[in-house]
Amino acid sequence: MWQFFHKLGSPKWFFGIATRFMPWLLAIGIILLLAGLVWGLAFAPKDYLQGNSYRIIFIHVPTAFLAQSIYIMMASAAVVTLVWRMKLADVFVKTVAPVGLVFTFLSLFTGAVWGKPTWGTWWVWDARLTSMLILLFLYGGAIALDRAINDEKSAARAVAVLVLVGVVNIPIIKYSVEWWNTLHQPATFKLTEKPSMPVEMWVPLLLSVLGLYLLFGWLACLRMKTEIVMREQKTRWVRELVMAGRG
Amino acid sequence: MAFDSFSAFIAMEGHGPYVWACYAVFAVLLVGLMVWSSRHHQAVMASCKRRYQQQENSTSARPKQAATFARVEVSQE
């Protein structure tokens, strides 16, 4: 276990593993996402209440789901950065934050566009929407803070603290639809219960969530590799790797 | 298929603009992020390679110069 943990912290070992897994992540991710989206757009039955506008769910839920789970992953990596000073954890937080920002923006955007025909308004200041907006600012804040501090180590620690403070927002997002009387509907998926949708609707939704998850994995591997090459360019293994044209 | 015709698929009973706008923005941002990230990776790898080659050239060129004894013409007067 500890050996695995130490190996995981080694940029060289990670680089090799990431290079090996990336083609699979990309291929399976694209297949699952496309299957989910095409199924959801063209083949899933229309919603009896919302009509066809509900088809936005097949991108709204995956992006919102990823936006939150990326933040949780970043917070876990931030703990590792602060406690064990592991290099890779900091690389993860730094490179993945912009991806989280894009997914959060997408979930807000698709939510706004979905809100117009369904609720009659693009935006309301209700608990779910506001807490998601705060998540967007947290991602933006982490990116800005990292850029503002020149020293790599102090930047890593400052960003880790910010990310950890912001994690309080995650349960607020999750339970906002239950604690407050919001316009937003409650969660479609729960781990403990059967989905409230028919099978032809939740299977494509599940496919697109999984597909986007894998594509996020691909993006994270790629962006971490870039950062590792930049940080470790003085080491021998990066030199050999770059000169051989691998990676 | 949930639609009778292709035009019905595009129109989505009036909800077409909303649905297609979401899918378009999603596709542009996701593909953009993926393409930008891989281009950035290629660029970083290429610039590292260039730097290593420069270093190799300069380190292999210098010892030669150091080994030659150039006569310095200095006036003795």
Image (cartoon, rainbow, N blue to C red):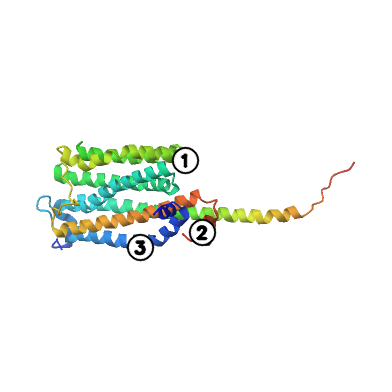
**Which of the numbered marks, if any, corresponds to residue A105?**
none
**Marked residue nearer the N-terminal end (1 or 3):** 3
What's the amino acid at mark 2? Leu
Identify the residue position indicated by label 2 in the image.
A241
Q: Are marks 1 and 2 in contact (CB under 8 Å)?
A: no
In which image quadrant can residue B75 be found? top right
Dot 2 lies on which element?
Answer: helix
Which x, y percent locates residue A176?
Answer: 20, 40
Q: Given this view, does label 1 or label 2 mark the residue nearer the observer?
A: 1
Dot 3 lies on which element?
Answer: helix
| Residue A75 visible in image | yes
Whether labels 1 and 3 belong to a single chain: the reply is yes
| Residue B40 visible in image | no
Which x, y percent locates residue A102?
Answer: 32, 47
How would you rate the neighbour count of disc 3 (Cα within 10 Å): few for under 14, some for 14-19, many for 20 or more? some
Identify the residue position indicated by label 3 in the image.
A24
What's the amino acid at mark 3? Trp
The reply, left or right, for residue A118 in relation to residue B30 is left
Identify the residue position indicated by label 1 in the image.
A153
How would you rate the neighbour count of disc 1 (Cα within 10 Å): few for under 14, some for 14-19, many for 20 or more? some
Which x, y percent locates residue A154?
Answer: 46, 38
**Marked residue nearer the N-terminal end (3 or 2):** 3
